Each structure stands twice: as structure tokens, then as C-alpha cells.
Image (tube, rainbow, N blue to C red):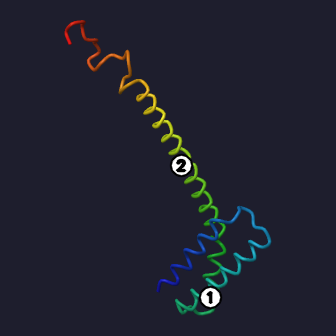
Amino acid sequence: MMTPILLALTLALVQQQQPPADTGEAGRLRRQIEDRFAQHVQQQLRLSPDQATKLRATQERFGERRRSLMRQQVDRRMALNDQLQFLERVSEMRQERRERRGGPGGPGMRPPGGRRPRRGSI
């Protein structure tokens, strides 16, 4: 039962790692993987040849759209990761700045409440 899931995940990973435009070799490998997957699905689901043909047509019709969405997802995850790394670095820089100043506000900064203590009152 796990085999179809593993095949589907493998197919998804292979398709994610492909460049946007197929080279001859990439296209050939993709077709080979898709053919093997289709054969496996047909056997597992006990599809008739007619059903298998319809399934294959559906896969072909939506395949490029699915690959495009997967590429968009990868691009967005990478952009999000870049933004998170940037924000993490900004946070680190703020912390370093606080530490150089000697505390949350640094020297010369007013304490909470906004007033400096009077001389002799401390």
C-alpha cells in the first residue's frame, strides 16, 4: 500500500527538481517515470484499458499546470526563506546594538518613565 504513495512522492520530487524548460533527456526521463507510474496505478486500481487511457489524458491535460504550480511553490518558499533570514539578521543586529550600548536602552538613554534620576536621590 505504501508503494503508490512513495511513487507519487518520488515523481513529485523529480518534477520539482527539473528546470522549467525540458531538455531532451529530462523530457525522456519524465515520460519514462510517468509511464511506469501509469502502469503501476492501472494495476493497483485494476483499471480497464479505456479507464487507463482516460486517466492518462487527464494527467497530461493537468500535468504542466501542476508542474507550474509546484515551481511557483518552490519559488515562494525560497522567497519566504530569504525574507525570514533577513528578519533574523535584523533581529541579531538589534541585539548586538543593545549589547554594545550596555543594556536595553544603552548609556545616556532615559529610564522607563522618561525622567532621569536627580543627583543624590539614588
Q: Quadrant of residue 24?
A: bottom right
- Residue sitting at 24 percent across and 7 percent down? 118
Q: Position of residue 29 (x, y in %)?
A: 72, 77
Q: Nearer the viewer, residue 113 or 23?
A: 113
Q: Residues within 10 Å of mark 2 (few under 14, many from 20)?
A: few
Residue matched to label 2: 80
- Residue sitting at 53 percent across and 90 percent down? 44
Secondary structure of residue under mark 1 = helix
Residue matched to label 1: 39
**Relative side of 78 to 115, left or right:** right
Residue 10's mark? Answer: none
Query: Distance from label 2 to label 1 (Cα)?
Result: 38 Å
Residue 116 vertical placement versus 98 (above, below): above
Q: Position of residue 13 (x, y in %)?
A: 59, 69
Q: Position of residue 58 (x, y in %)?
A: 62, 76
**Relative side of 40 to 25, left or right:** left
* Residue placed furthest toward the top: 119
Q: Nearer the viewer, residue 63 or 107?
A: 107
Residue 87 vertical placement versus 29 (above, below): above
Residue kind at label 1, given as amino acid type: Gln
- Residue sitting at 71 percent across and 63 percent down? 19
